[in-house]
Image (cartoon, rainbow, N blue to C red):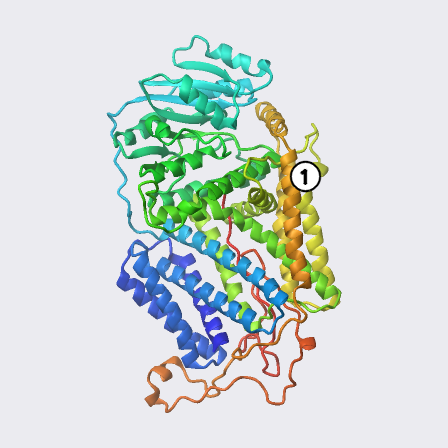
Amino acid sequence: MWLTIVLTSALLLAVATVLLLAVGHRIRVSSRVLGILLAAGISFGSAELATRLWNLVPRYVLAGAGLTLLSCAVVVFLVPYWNPVGQVFLGAYVAAAGTYLALAAYITVAGDLSALGIAASGILFVFEFLALLLSGYFAFEGCDVLCRTRDTRLIPEPDPHHLPRVSLQVAAYNEPADMLIETIKSLERIDYPNYEILVVDNNTPDPETWRPVAEYSDGRERVRFVHIEADGFKAGALNVVLAEHLDPDVELIGVVDADYLVDPRYLRRVVGYFAHPTVAFVQAPQNYREYENDTYLTACYDAYEYFFKASMPSRNQRNSIIFAGTMGLIRRSVLREIGGWPEWCITEDSETSLRMLKAGYEGVYIDEPLGQGIMPLTFATFKSQRFRWCFGGLQILRRHFRDLLPLPRTSRNRLSFAQRADYLFGTGLVWFNDLLYLGFTVVLLVTAYLVLTERALPFRPLLGPLMLLPAALIASGVLRALWSLRHRTGIGVRRSLLALLNWLSLSWTVAMASLQALVRSKAVFMRTPKEREQQTLWTAVRDARSETALTVLLWTAGIAVAVSGGGTPLLVFLFGWQGLVYGSSLLMSWLNVRTELGPVLEWRRRTELRRERAAAHMPYYLGGGAAVTAVALVAAVLIIGGEHPGRRPGGLELPRSPDGPSIIDVIRPGEKGQQPTPRPDNSPSAPAQTPADTPVETPSSPEETPSSPEQTPTEPGSSPTGEPAESESPTPQASAPS
């Protein structure tokens, strides 16, 4: 029965995914009745197809269809403002993921493993559970922004006559003077009657770097320059400004990065929302310039844009956006009320917005670019930026974890359930996505070692037909992510695929930052290598040396397993795919080496590297050592965990219906007589399987990919004798946009 439900769930998810990709973004009608009717039609239509395609027992297929219909009904009730296609897709995903986890847990417990074998399989199950949980959150977010038919939040209307005094603060550290002056000039052109520009140089060691900016600012009507020596990174400097350098009549504070050119309409477009006293901050999207006609920079741009085109509009409906720093305004009185900028956190902007929301205030997102900056121009600094974002996000998670749990509201914490979920997953747990990649990589390498040394695997064994369900989950996740990216940004297939590779290229970096954040609470920085004037292929390899080593290791292990004959084709494919995840880093590094920059951007590139190298790196190495130790302990448990791979648990046969009745025959059995008794599809003459005969399992894969195991058209996963083949299934992994 269980395998029949698995096959039915896989087919239902595949049908729902195809429907989502085809028309999910086009339908502008939402209705609970239509959602239930569509769910019923797809569930029982797919059940009929599964019955006829694979000759399955109809009543077991009906059980799988019923579970999916129940899941869809719950989703329809929870999100009535989605169109029916989005409702059915999310319901089918939840049903498929739940079925897979339930069956994986059953096989783990009932597989006759030793205590350490159960521990090893338990680690694998935790990886799978977290991967599916994060993937489900991303699926919800992507569907919410494209399948939503109406707003559910009443956002305050801006008052164009509300014109309070604004202080625009440009925080700079070791920035090129010419570029910073251009930013100041763009701010001076803003069409707004009541504002000041405060240029804050923070700890730049060489006075010759900031003196031209000070000379330019001197005597200008709206501009003031201050040089500050302060601890606490950028937040420390901004706190000094808040306490000592603001005019008393300033009501709003705006933060602008030192490389931004700001639209003259910026303040008039944003300030009006603050006429409502509950609005504490307003955020416009971060946008970038001078990336056109370069493959690497365009891939970075598209990857950046997903967050502001999909995640932020979705979160805006639940009043759970983040304050992203530049191109945002914040109310001065509320900032003082919550205690100022957090100097302990290296992502001080998003942590500040969380405290404001906890205090009961609102944030507003305007989906309109009003300024353009410059992206990190080297792959090394791009990785370093993402390292900081990840470490800061997990600092927030550690500090506020209890406040993000689904507990009752209090006067100290007024976050709604939706706000807590968005910050828990979208700001905190999302960074563990790439740590799961690393965990699955360890599983793959341990599997290769055990296969090549002809030792038994300690993990739970999974059966052939089970591979269809996680394959469907994987393919569904990748296609859904690319669908969301394309339709929200308007880019083509090639750019979407390059953006996906750009996301993957940071997997190792984010995993290392996650491990660092688990063992350290104070900020550490990723070391960036010293660049030479001449960029070469060696530069690309060096900037991605860890990822390149992992790629070679995984692909070599996959080839060795294939040559040995000890692994299934799916196992070999997983080695190839996981190697591609890390190999994408080398690809992006090589594309970056080929980037040609003009004189101004070339100077910017050099100053980027000087800023990164100025950070203290000893804590990074100490934390990295602790991280490697943790990975080694997990690998040790996997290697020694179990004396044999476990027996095949009962109840996992694939029953067949010899006369091939349809679903309609089960619903109305009187028309064709009594339903035949199902029988397990195994031969009495087949020899019993011993532990030594148990095929090598396939460990879980951390990445969503549209691959599926090879199956015959009529009997998925069965051998020529009718006995189901055994193999472990891949595990779906959420597609990570940062």
Between residue 402 and residue 506, name the one nearer to us. Answer: 402
Between residue 395 and residue 320, name the one nearer to us. Answer: 395
When asked about the image quadrant of residue 62, the answer is: bottom left
Q: Position of residue 250 (x, y in %)?
A: 33, 20
Q: Position of residue 729 (x, y in %)?
A: 57, 66
Residue 310 showing in the rendered view:
no
Between residue 408 and residue 673, name the one nearer to us. Answer: 408
Residue lying furthest bottom in this view? 673
Between residue 553 and residue 514, name the one nearer to us. Answer: 514
Q: Secondary structure at mark 1?
A: helix
Q: Position of residue 209 (x, y in %)?
A: 58, 16
Residue 35 showing in the rendered view:
yes
248 relative to 494, above or below: above
Q: Position of residue 593 (x, y in %)?
A: 65, 36
Side of 15 where 722 appears, left or right:
right
Q: Residue at x 47, y 86 (%)?
A: 678
How many residues crowd mark 1 within 10 Å: few (<14), some (14–19), many (20+)?
many
Residue lying furthest top in this view? 219
666 relative to 404, above or below: below
Side of 253 where 344 appears, left or right:
right
Residue that label 1 marks: 540
Give the mark count: 1
432 relative to 5, above or below: above
Q: Residue at x 37, y 62 (%)?
A: 88
Q: Amino acid at mark 1?
A: Ala
